[in-house]
Amino acid sequence: MSFSPLTQQLIEALTCLPGVGPKSAQRMALHLLDRDRQRASKLADVLSQAMIKIGRCQKCRNFTENPLCHVCSQTSRDPSLLCVVETPADVIAIEQSGTYRGFYFLLLGHLSPIDGIGPDEIGIPLLDERLGQGEVKELIIATGTTVEGEATAHFISEMARIHGVKASRIAHGVPMGGELEYVDSNTLALALRGRRVME
């Protein structure tokens, strides 16, 4: 069976979502068209508005509609602590642990020379500039424990050392090869408390 050109375009567009293959996309598209057009219209409207209005925080690079995100706008946080993470989902995971009161810097990825992702692509010049301002005293590196995450952590710890900033790495309980967004908040709380200085 073949679909109309626009239906086929909708199915193909939905496959851009992580974990959504052609069959799942087909089910979603047909569900939206057949049973839930009102919510589909709302989804389309919200998605369109989000693409227009949501940008990056000028300080940490997280998603926000404002110049500064919710976390960077909080004056009660400790400016001497900066936690480096790979994704916005990592920020949410750490925030849910309820134990961290510093600020964040999002890399939006990790170093991967094979994929052409170098320091510039993950915002290292911005991080370097922030460390150079002298406000940060400890840099908590919370990249994933993949090979790329470890390489990125080592690169960042060397940069922190050059600036005279203590670099620590989260530990205890975060599984090797795991991603932070899948770790429960108690495990993350323990990992933050048990962070170690990188050498």
Image (tube, rainbow, N blue to C red):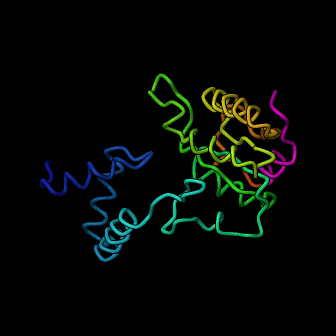
Confirm whether the magenta stretch covers residue 58.
no
Q: Closest to the observer: 170 or 35?
A: 170
Relative height, residue 35 to residue 24 (above, below)? below
Relative height, residue 46 to residue 55 (above, below)? below
Name of the residue lying farthest toward the front: 133
Residue occupying image coordinates x 63% and y 50%:
105
Residue occupying image coordinates x 50% and y 57%:
56
**Residue 28, image x and y in percent?**
34, 58
Q: Closest to the observer: 196 or 167?
A: 167
Left or right of 120, for residue 181: right
Q: Closest to the observer: 196 or 32?
A: 196
Q: Quadrant of residue 168?
A: top right
Left or right of 103, for residue 171: right
Magenta region:
186-199
**Residue 130, image x and y in percent?**
65, 48
**Residue 76, image x and y in percent?**
77, 69
Residue occupying image coordinates x 63% and y 26%:
147
